[in-house]
Image: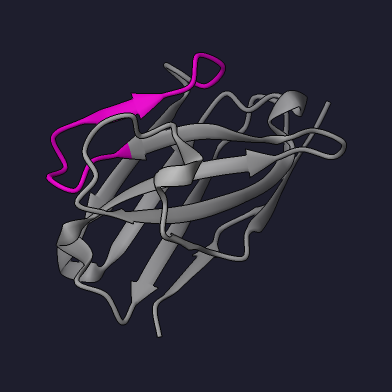
């Protein structure tokens, strides 16, 4: 059974950094695009960042571009989201998602086959 497990969330002050990790199991990781989405209280889920299954293509939402970096380590079945210059507006539950053989339109949530349960990120002002 495919599983995606996020970790690394927590409470941080504005301007600080966090690194989220997503570990996958029971899947051939190199065949999957990985993405991070988030849902803030009272808001819809939104795309944050994605990386294609070849690893050569990345996409970011305008709200995080230049502050967040997505990466993947196929040898460790792991994706990461390095978040810097965090703002209170970044407060949300962050979800990892995987889509098989997907390499474009990484922001389309409907493309993703598997989802993790999320990790909470809270940024205080």
User: In the figure, residue 17 lies in which quadrant?
Assistant: top right
Which quarter shows the N terminus?
A: bottom left
106 versus 101 height, above or below = above
Up-down relation of residue 65 to residue 46 (above or below): above
x, y percent for residue 4: 45, 69
Q: Position of residue 14 (x, y in %)?
A: 72, 27
Q: Nearer the viewer, residue 84 or 96?
A: 96
Task: Label the magenta part by its dominant secondary structure.
Answer: loop
Q: From the viewer's perspective, is 94 left or right of 10? A: left
Q: How is the image coloured?
A: one colour
Q: Is residue 56 left or right of residue 72?
A: left
Residue farthest to the bottom?
1
Query: Is residue 14 rendered to the left or right of residue 30?
Result: right
Residue 118's x, y, as percent? 63, 59
Which quadrant: the C terminus?
top right
Q: Position of residue 26 (x, y in %)?
A: 31, 82
Q: Is residue 56 magenta?
A: yes
120 or 29: nearer the viewer: 29
View extreme (front): residue? 110
Q: Quadrant of residue 37 in the image?
A: top right
**What residue is shown at x 52% (from left), y 22% (from top)?**
64
Residue visible at 43% across and 31% down in the picture = 107
Asked if 105 appears above or below 72 in the picture, the reply is above
Q: Is residue 76 magenta?
A: no
At 42% from the left edge and 51% from the top edge, which residue is drawn? Answer: 112
- State which region is magenta: 51-64
Residue located 57% across and 52% down the image:
95
Count of labels in the image: 0
When the figure is inspected, residue 39 is found, relative to residue 86, above or below; the finding is: below
């Amino acid at each position: 059974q495919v599983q995606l497990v996020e970790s690394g969330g927590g409470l941080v002050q504005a301007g600080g950094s966090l690194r989220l990790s997503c570990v996958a199991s029971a899947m051939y990781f190199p065949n999957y695009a990985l993405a991070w989405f988030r849902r803030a209280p009272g808001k819809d889920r939104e795309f944050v960042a994605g990386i294609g299954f070849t690893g050569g293509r990345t996409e970011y939402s305008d709200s995080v571009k230049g502050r967040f970096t997505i990466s993947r380590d196929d040898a460790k079945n792991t994706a990461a989201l390095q978040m810097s210059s965090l703002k209170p507006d970044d407060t949300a539950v962050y979800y990892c998602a995987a889509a098989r053989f997907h390499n474009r339109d990484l922001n389309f949530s409907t493309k993703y086959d598997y989802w993790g349960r999320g990790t909470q990120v809270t940024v205080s002002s």
